[in-house]
Image (cartoon, grey):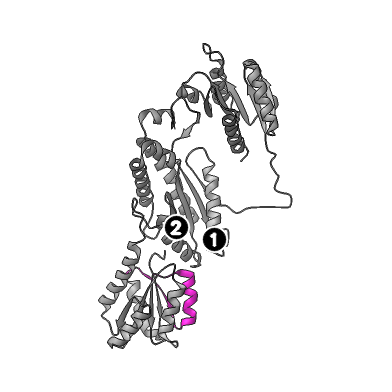
């Protein structure tokens, strides 16, 4: 893993080899170039943290430093001039040109290593995320770029905590930070010395490791470990219930799922990547597949087999079943739904629901609670969600009984207290219909 990288631009082979060995002895990856032209490609491909440039090269060192400074304005490496000169004016001129340091040769080997380490430390000190103390997205991006250009086998993992924003809103920022810190410690414990762990966004982690097999083992462990500890970050009632509430009984609300982890893994074992943008795009796409899972999960990119006409377009399901005993309201809902392009089936008796589902296969069911004494709708909802395994419909449960916990525990996807606005219920219908057809 090219965690710390230095480029030495020096025409003198023996001298650059000596410097290279010194730096490699303290776990720094070193690139060498004997001329300025060849160094530019290394700078672009690997974005070294420190660039050592000797005045021995067949190029004006002042111009070289100026050009490097311009080309690396967004990554800011430390540029160190090497020279046998000990004249103060030479030092001032190169420092004014853009060099960050000037080393007069010969230089003590221990001082040389200490100075390079000091520059790298100073660069990296400004790249930590405060709450996790991991490297930020700029460093992670740089590490991905280095691995991409290293010609070695690699696997990259994008890891995040789903529903963390909802958790933060309910439990507070300190609790969310503690959860994030705990997970970062779990991830760190699963890695070896040669692996890289950093952040890719505010709440996302990047792991770079050597092989697909190793990445899959790490991902499998993280899913298990996360699910083992996450219940400790909830109240007993939320942990037992399996979901959270954000509002009181007077407001419509779907189930706020407990936090989970989703992990996407890509590798160069099966696919050749040409640039960092392609890597990031593939990583995000694979990670999204993991996020579609209900619980914590990981997805590993696999080789694809394709043929002519192999992809079949899935037909969108716009079917809605309305189970509403109030005939006037059911007519209003049906007319509005048809105007918005939905296919609608209406039943006014609870006993007719099961047959209608078999015949109609609705994406969304609007289900009323029924009589306040019998609450027949709750019984139907439980049966649909917990007994009939083939029912995949989203259930919007409308009720005059303001008991959100009872309704959502019965399996409903949305608690919607009556009376409600048509714009509100159809906003939810669109959301659930889109989710069903993803």
| Residue 121 coordinates in the image, percent (x, y) | 31, 66
- Say above or below: 35 vs 352: below
- Say above or below: 185 vs 24: above
Disc sitting over residue 129 in the figure: none
Question: Within 10 Å of the Cα at label 1, are there few (<14), some (14-19), or many (20+) other Cα atoms?
Answer: few
For the question of whether residue 323 can be seen, the reply is yes
Residue for badge 2? 208
Q: Secondary structure at mark 2?
A: strand
Give, as a single range, the part of the protein colored magenta.
26-49
Pick the residue in front: 100 or 144. Answer: 100
Picture mark count: 2
Q: Is residue 307 left or right of residue 2?
A: right
User: Which image quadrant for residue 177?
Assistant: top left
Disc sitting over residue 277 in the figure: 1
Question: Within 10 Å of the Cα at label 2, are there few (<14), some (14-19), or many (20+) other Cα atoms?
Answer: many
For the question of whether residue 361 can be seen, the reply is no
- In the rendered image, the quadrant that contains the N terminus is bottom left
Report the residue at 52% width, 45% height from top.
290
User: Which image quadrant for residue 127?
Assistant: bottom left
Report the residue at 63% width, 31% height from top.
363
Question: In front: mark 2 or mark 1?
Answer: 1
Q: Is residue 241 left or right of residue 411?
A: left
| Residue 207 coordinates in the image, percent (x, y) | 43, 55
User: Which image quadrant for residue 249?
Assistant: top left
| Residue 375 coordinates in the image, percent (x, y) | 53, 15
Which residue ends up furthest to the right in the rendered image? 309
Label 2 to label 1: alpha-carbon separation: 16 Å
- Say above or below: 88 vs 139: below
Report the residue at 44% width, 71% height from top.
72
Pick the residue in front: 207 or 334. Answer: 334
As for residue 230 lying within the magenta part, the answer is no
């Amino acid at each position: 893993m090219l965690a710390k990288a230095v480029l030495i631009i020096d025409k003198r082979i023996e001298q650059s080899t000596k410097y290279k060995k010194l730096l490699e002895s303290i776990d720094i990856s070193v690139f060498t170039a004997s001329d300025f032209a060849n160094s530019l490609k290394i700078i672009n491909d690997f974005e070294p943290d420190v660039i050592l440039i000797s005045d021995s090269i067949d190029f004006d060192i002042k111009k070289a430093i100026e050009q490097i400074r311009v080309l690396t304005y967004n990554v800011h490496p430390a540029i160190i001039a090497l020279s046998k000169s000990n004249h103060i004016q030479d030092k001032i001129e190169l420092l004014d040109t853009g060099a960050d340091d000037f080393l007069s040769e010969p230089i003590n080997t221990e001082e040389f290593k200490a100075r390079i380490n000091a520059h790298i430390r100073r660069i990296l000190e400004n790249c930590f995320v405060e709450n996790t103390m991991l490297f930020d997205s700029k460093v992670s991006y740089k590490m991905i770029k280095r691995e991409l250009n290293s010609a070695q086998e690699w696997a990259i993992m994008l890891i995040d905590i789903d529903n963390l924003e909802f958790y933060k809103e309910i439990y507070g920022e300190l609790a969310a930070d503690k959860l994030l810190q705990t997970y970062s410690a779990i991830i760190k414990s699963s890695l070896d010395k040669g692996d890289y762990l950093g952040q890719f966004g505010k709440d996302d982690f990047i792991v770079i490791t050597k092989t697909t097999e190793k990445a899959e083992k790490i991902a499998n462990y993280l899913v298990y470990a996360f699910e083992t500890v996450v219940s400790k970050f909830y109240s007993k009632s939320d942990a037992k219930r399996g979901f959270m509430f954000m509002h009181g009984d007077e407001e419509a609300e779907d189930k706020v799922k407990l936090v989970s982890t989703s992990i996407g893994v890509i590798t160069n074992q099966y696919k050749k990547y040409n640039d960092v943008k392609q890597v990031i795009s593939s990583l995000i796409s694979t990670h999204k597949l993991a996020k579609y899972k209900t619980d914590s999960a990981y997805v590993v990119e696999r080789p694809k087999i394709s043929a002519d006409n192999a992809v079949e377009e899935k037909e969108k399901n716009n079917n809605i079943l309305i189970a509403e005993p109030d005939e006037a309201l059911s007519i209003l809902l049906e007319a509005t739904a048809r105007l918005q392009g939905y296919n609608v089936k209406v039943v006014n008796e609870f006993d007719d629901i099961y047959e209608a589902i078999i015949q109609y296969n609705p994406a969304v069911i609007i289900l009323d609670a029924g009589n306040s004494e019998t609450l027949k709708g709750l019984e139907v909802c439980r049966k649909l969600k917990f007994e009939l395994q083939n029912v995949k419909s989203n259930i919007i449960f409308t009720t005059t009984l303001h008991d959100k916990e009872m309704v959502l525990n019965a399996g409903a996807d949305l608690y919607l207290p009556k009376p409600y606005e048509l714009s509100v219920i159809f906003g939810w219908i669109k959301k659930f219909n889109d989710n069903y057809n993803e």
